[in-house]
Image (cartoon, rainbow, N blue to C red):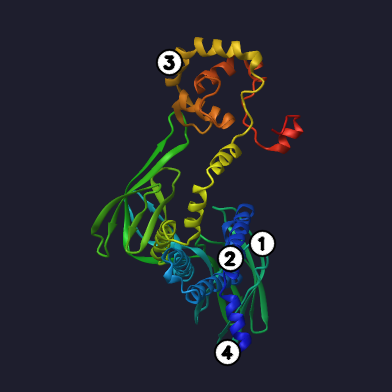
């Protein structure tokens, strides 16, 4: 029993907690790269929905609970709330993972809909005697092997994975399977995937027809959504959509209006535990596509964020906490602020401008009224089709180059105007903020 106690003492430690949290963070980072290189489904299968990632989450939760008990952490309220927040957030993540689901709903203007298509795809197998469905999570990364076995009229019906071809969003993917009934076997090609409901393909055996389809499952909601009007706004002078919204009515089971609502970007509808987001729209602008989320872990997660914030704030005033010690230390280290300030200063962008001081002064005096009053109000269109004042565009350009809104006594408008009239001069004036020592070495600048 001694080794068990030692193991528990080691497991319930800050080092193990930090290690587990680091694994979760690294896993999330890897999943982000997988999602950008492949697709969201591959990231879920490889990381988020993988057994190893879920195991680390459970171990992290247990480890923090044990650590709080071992150290009597409730005596330090700030630290206790911070650790309790992580536990609550992990519990919320578990509820989302195992009890939440997502789907999409398509509604046309003047119509109502109470059915959603699941984001998860299913392999549907139907025979005259029975029907079955199996969730499929296929990925471009790794193995997709699966085998489903049922017994029909005393004979085994086996469906085995053969091949998979991924298609981009909005296109049909292809799945090849081997179907064996008794001693007979057939190879079948099935098109579909998440978001699709296709006609089943039929394979005939001696005395049995098997119908196979692969796509989303239809879920019926306890209410309906009616689309009164879909609204699309574009940037002036462009076909690019600036915003779009759906004017909807929520209908009860008797098709009577319960409430009216406007769904648009960052303004979803929350109703009976479901959240409706504006996702897409039809090309004729007469229909909308809503993303639906049923997430029982949402409120526990929000509660965890609240506890985390409260814990950090409380930690500032808890005697003996790291924040409290740091605050006391900084009172006796005023020079640290000066060091921090100096560390954030980059290269002096005013260097090498002595030869152009007269030119810069001339620009400052002669263009002040024209640039800062008349030109600043001129409407221009950016590469994305957005209309905005010239002052906004000029400020974005100058800030991107110099990290400042003005330089050499010139406003952003004056600088952009001067650059366009005398680019031969401005190519020799230092305006790009540079802090990286390696780059300065490569271009022959002094590191200091």
Foreground of the two, 184 or 215: 215
Nearer to us of marks 2 and 3 is 2
Counting from the top left corner in percent of width and height, residue 345 is at 59, 35
Residue underneath mark 1: 141
Distance of label 2 from label 3 (alpha carbons): 58 Å
Residue positioned 58% across, 78% down in the render: 9
Q: Residues within 10 Å of mark 4 (few under 14, many from 20)?
A: few
Counting from the top left corner in percent of width and height, residue 23 is at 61, 64
Residue underneath mark 3: 374
Note whether 368 is above or below 54 in the view shown.
above
Sooner in the amino-acid sequence: mark 1 or mark 3: 1
Distance of label 2 from label 4 (alpha carbons): 54 Å
Distance of label 2 from label 1 (alpha carbons): 29 Å
Secondary structure at numbered mark 4:
loop
Residue underneath mark 4: 154
Residue positioned 52% across, 43% down in the render: 334
Q: Residues within 10 Å of mark 1 (few under 14, many from 20)?
A: some
Secondary structure at numbered mark 2:
helix
Residue underneath mark 2: 18
Sooner in the amino-acid sequence: mark 4 or mark 3: 4
Nearer to us of marks 4 and 3 is 3
Distance of label 4 from label 1 (alpha carbons): 37 Å
């Amino acid at each position: 029993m001694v080794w068990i106690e030692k193991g528990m003492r080691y497991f319930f430690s800050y080092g193990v907690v930090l290690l587990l949290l680091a694994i979760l963070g690294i896993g999330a980072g890897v999943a982000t790269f997988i999602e950008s290189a492949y697709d969201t489904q591959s990231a879920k299968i490889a990381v988020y929905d993988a057994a190893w990632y879920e195991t680390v989450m459970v171990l992290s939760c247990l480890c923090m609970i044990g650590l709080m008990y071992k150290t009597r952490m409730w005596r330090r309220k700030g630290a206790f709330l911070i650790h309790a927040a992580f536990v609550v957030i992990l519990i919320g993540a578990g509820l989302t993972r195992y009890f939440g689901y997502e789907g999409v709903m398509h509604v046309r203007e003047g119509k109502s809909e109470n059915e959603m298509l699941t984001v998860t795809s299913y392999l549907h197998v139907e025979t005259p005697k029975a029907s079955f469905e199996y969730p499929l999570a296929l990925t471009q990364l790794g193995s997709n092997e699966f085998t489903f076995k049922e017994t029909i009229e005393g004979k085994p019906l086996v469906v085995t994975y053969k091949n998979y071809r991924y298609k981009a969003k909005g296109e049909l993917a292809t799945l090849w399977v081997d179907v064996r009934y008794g001693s007979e076997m057939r190879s079948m090609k099935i098109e579909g995937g998440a978001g699709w409901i296709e006609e089943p393909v039929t394979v005939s055996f001696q005395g049995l027809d098997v119908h196979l389809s692969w796509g989303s499952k239809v879920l019926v909601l306890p209410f309906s959504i009616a689309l009164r009007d879909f609204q699309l706004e574009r940037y002036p002078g462009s076909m690019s959509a600036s915003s779009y919204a759906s004017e909807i009515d929520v209908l009860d089971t008797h098709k009577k209006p319960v409430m009216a609502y406007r769904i648009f970007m960052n303004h979803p509808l929350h109703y009976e535990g479901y959240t409706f987001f504006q996702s897409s729209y039809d090309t004729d602008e007469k229909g909308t596509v809503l993303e639906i989320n049923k997430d029982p872990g949402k409120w526990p997660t929000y509660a965890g964020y609240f506890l985390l914030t409260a814990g950090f704030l409380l930690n500032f005033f808890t005697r003996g906490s790291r924040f409290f010690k740091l605050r006391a230390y900084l009172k006796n280290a005023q020079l640290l602020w000066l060091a921090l300030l100096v560390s954030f200063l980059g290269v002096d962008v005013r260097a090498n401008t002595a030869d152009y001081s007269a030119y810069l002064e001339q620009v400052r005096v002669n263009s002040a009224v024209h640039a800062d009053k008349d030109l600043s109000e001129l409407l221009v269109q950016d590469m994305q089709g957005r209309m905005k004042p010239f002052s906004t565009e000029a400020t974005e350009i100058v800030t991107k180059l110099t990290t400042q809104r003005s330089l050499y006594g010139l406003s952003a408008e004056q600088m952009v105007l001067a650059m366009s009239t005398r680019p031969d001069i401005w190519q020799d004036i230092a305006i790009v903020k540079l802090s990286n020592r390696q780059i300065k070495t490569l271009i022959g600048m002094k590191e200091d």
